[in-house]
Amino acid sequence: MTFLLIAIGGFMGAIARYVLSTWMNKKSSKGFPIGTLFINLVGSFLLGWIVGQGITSDLYSFLGIGFMGAFTTFSTLKLENVQLRENKKYSILYPYLAYSYIGGILLAFAGISLGSL
C-alpha cells in the first residue's frame, strides 16, 4: 500500500510541477529559470511544513515522499546551472544559485517552524 501511495503522490507531484513550471517559464522572457526556482522554493517550504506538522505514515508517504519528491526537482536545478554556466550567463547563474540554496534552506526552516505551531 505504501508503494501505491508514493506512486500516486509522485504522479500528481510531477504533473503539478510540469504544469506550474511551464506556465511560469512562459511568463519569463529574461532567461531566468523562474519556474524551477519557484517550484523548489515552494517545495522546500511545504516539505518543511509537512515535517513540522509531524505527519507520518501513509499521509507522509503520499505527500512528503511521493508528491513533494516529484514536485521539487534537484536534477533540473543542476542542469539549468550547467547550461547557464556554459552559456556564460553569470548574471543569472549566481543569483539563481543563491536564491535556490539560501532561499530553500530558509523556507524549509520557516515551514518547519510554522508547521509545528
Image (tube, grey):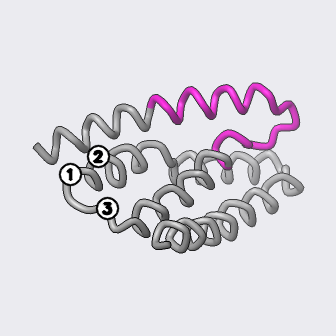
Q: How far is the residue under mark 1 from the one under mark 2?
A: 6 Å
Q: Secondary structure at mark 3?
A: loop
Q: Secondary structure at mark 2?
A: helix
Residue placed furthest toward the front? 117
Where does the N terminus fall, quadrant-wise? top left
Q: Earlier in the sequence, mark 2 or mark 3?
A: 3
Q: CB under 8 Å between callouts 1 and 2?
A: yes
Q: Which residues are magenta?
A: 15-37
- Name the residue tied to disc 2: 62
User: Which of 54/14 is in front?
Assistant: 54
Relative horizontal placement of residue 5, taking residue 101 as reference (left or right)? left
Q: Position of residue 77 (x, y in %)?
A: 60, 51
Tell me which amino acid carries mark 1. Answer: Asp
Relative horizontal placement of residue 98, taking residue 60 as reference (left or right)? right
User: Which of 76/15 is in front?
Assistant: 15
Residue 99 sits above or below residue 1 on the image: below
The disc label shown at residue 96, or none: none
User: Which of 48/31 is in front?
Assistant: 48
Relative horizontal placement of residue 96, taking residue 67 as reference (left or right)? right
Tell me which amino acid carries mark 3. Answer: Ile
Q: Residue at x 40, y 50 (%)?
A: 69
Residue 117 sits above or below residue 11 on the image: below
Q: Main secondary structure of the magenta part?
A: helix
- Name the residue tied to disc 1: 58
At label 3, counting other C-alpha atoms closer than 10 Å, the crowd grade (few under 14, some 14-19, many 20 or more) is some
Q: Position of residue 9 (x, y in %)?
A: 32, 39
Q: Position of residue 79 (x, y in %)?
A: 60, 47
Q: Residue at x 74, y 61 (%)?
A: 99
Q: Residue at x 75, y 56 (%)?
A: 96
- Name the residue tied to disc 3: 55
